[in-house]
Image: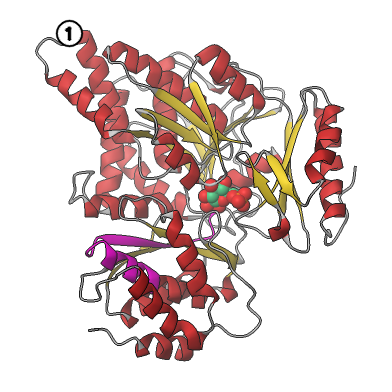
Amino acid sequence: SSVDLRTVYAFAREFHSKGPNIGKMLYGTAGFRTLHDKLEFIAFRMGILATLRSRTFSGQAIGVMITASHNPECDNGVKIIDPKGEMLEMSWEGIATDLVNVSDDKLESEVAKIIAQQKVDMNAQSNVFIGMDTRYHSPAMGRAVVNGVRALKGNLRDYGILTTPMLHYLVFSHNVKGAYGTPTEAGYVAKLVTAFKKLRGEKLENGNYKNFLLFDGANGVGSLKMFEFNRQLAGTLQCQVFNANGKINHNCGADYVKTSQRPPTGLPEHEPNTRCVSVDGDADRVVYFFIDSNGTFHLLDGDRIATLIADYLMDLVQKCGISLKLGIVQTAYANGASTDYIVDQLKIDVACAQTGVKHLHHKALEYDIGVYFEANGHGTVIFSEKTKAKLSVALNSTATSEERREALNKLLLTIDLINETVGDAISDMLLVETILHTKGWDLSDWLATYDDLPNLQQKVKVQDRNIFETTDAERICVKPEGLQDKINEIVKKYKRGRSFVRPSGTEDVVRVYAEAENADDVQLLAAEVSILVYEMANGVGERPMI
Ligand code: G16
């Protein structure tokens, strides 16, 4: 072959050696994720893998994103983005896992194996796009990816600090030669801002909708990029950024706000009922919240966002006079009340997928318009090619009435405002702002659409979380054996009780979810199930308490 694989081993040995005592690593919910000082060799190997994968697509760009997203600052991670801007195809997750788990001296033969099995043409072009979050150890990881690419003589573009969704966009828009928008960061910002401004029109406020919101940037890349958006949005949306300089995700950001159900630290003094948003460390998740005049905190999570968007889109589609199948995809974490609302009130099709955006995205592809959101605020909307074609045919037809034409234009602008490759906190926020503005709603109007069931999420540390196995979109735990029967027994005691457990794919914990009709019950239910997990699976550290 034209590329000498010896370099792979030489670089590994000299720069990015694996070192001893590294246990088995898995390509998890969103790539490899662990303590940052264990990750450089993995970043190097992912540079190699991305280069090989790009060659299997004759040089189409593949993305490598360095981030641990919602995790604490000490963690980092690396995830791969496929040519269409989607998450790495699942069959390659296993290849990635194998590549990471061999020792340095087996690296060369493992790479040769992938080349043979995947029929990689080593003379083909290869392009790897690299992006990173603001963690102080991300640049070192980025250099390791670069060395991986160089070891196989691939081309690379290092975009430096980016949000995860920006990199997804850059990969896709580059591969389709700009058909999805100009393939630059500035092009992305301009695409979203232009669509947003057109949708908003002249009137900045409407009914209960006030033109001001507070933006918790989780001390991550989201805050940096929001400053740039603000420059472009000047004169339209007034968005005040906070949590821009501290420790990433520390007592702030979407994950903290959602799981602890309280406002982030650093929240500036403000009028009651002000709209507030929190994004996570790499700005691919968003949740809304507000504090009312009694000082009570209210959360509007990913389930809310999904229902708001789906309702708005259904309305637009009807006005367009086109028949399209719209569906919502959720996970087991979706609040039971949101699912009831979708089925009973919105009368929209709803599906349940496994945790992880890749699973939801996949399921959403089955609809003409697929709205998918995890309760934690990660999600987006995808429109099939057929849907887009129908819309432009209708728009260009002389038989289309003015009224329908207006709806069609609005829907096409809405599509432009959405990042279809992956959920983007800022794009999602601009969409929610558009909908609230259209409806003339403040957050309490939105909150009034349905009442969440009280719910709790807990983490239990166990010796080995990989002994847990689930089925039925994670709603049933099949291993350890007998655990599910015991959970069922416990759940039975609580009105509208529901609980499930699953191993996290991003943190070394087992997650416990519980919901019930009242807040006291949900505390008890979550505690009982957490104790059960701790006891049946060799809990580590403090025993959960009732
Ligand atoms: C990632 C995934 C999400 C998932 C979350 C938690 O989010 O992209 O789909 O919900 O991890 O996953 P788990 O429960 O398996 O730890 P992020 O924002 O951290 O990339």
What residue lies at 71% left-to-right and 27% top-to-bottom? Answer: 296
Tell which residue pokes out farthest to the front in this image.
117
What residue lies at 23% left-to-right and 54% top-to-bottom? Answer: 175
Q: Say which quadrant the C terminus sits in.
A: top right
- Quarter holding residue 330: top right
Tell which residue pokes out farthest to the right in this image.
546
Dot 1 amino acid type: Ser
- Quarter holding residue 198: top left
Q: Disc 1 designates what residue?
A: 401
Across and down, in percent, residue 299 comes to: 63, 31
Tell whether position 57 is magenta.
yes
| Depicted 115 relative to depicted 19: above or below | above
Near-viewer residue (200 or 57): 57
| Depicted 212 relative to depicted 179: above or below | above
- Mark 1 and ligand 1: say if the CB distance to the nearest ligand atom is below 8 Å: no
The magenta-colored residue range is: 48-69
| Depicted 55 relative to depicted 253: above or below | below
**Left or right, residue 359 beside residue 3:** right
Tell whether position 128 is magenta.
no
Near-viewer residue (461 or 451): 461
Q: In this orientation, does residue 196 appear?
A: no
Instruction: Describe the element under mark 1 as helix, strand or loop.
Output: loop
Q: In this orientation, does residue 92 appear?
A: yes
What residue lies at 18% left-to-right and 9% top-to-bottom? Answer: 402
Across and down, in percent, residue 8 comes to: 39, 85
**Left or right, residue 70 beside residue 168:** right
Q: Say which quadrant the N terminus sits in.
A: bottom left
Colour scheme in the image? secondary structure
**Left or right, residue 391 beside residue 139:** left
Mark 1 crowd level (few <14, some 14–19, many ≥20, 10 Å Cα): few
Across and down, in percent, residue 384 comes to: 30, 33
Near-viewer residue (129 or 73): 129
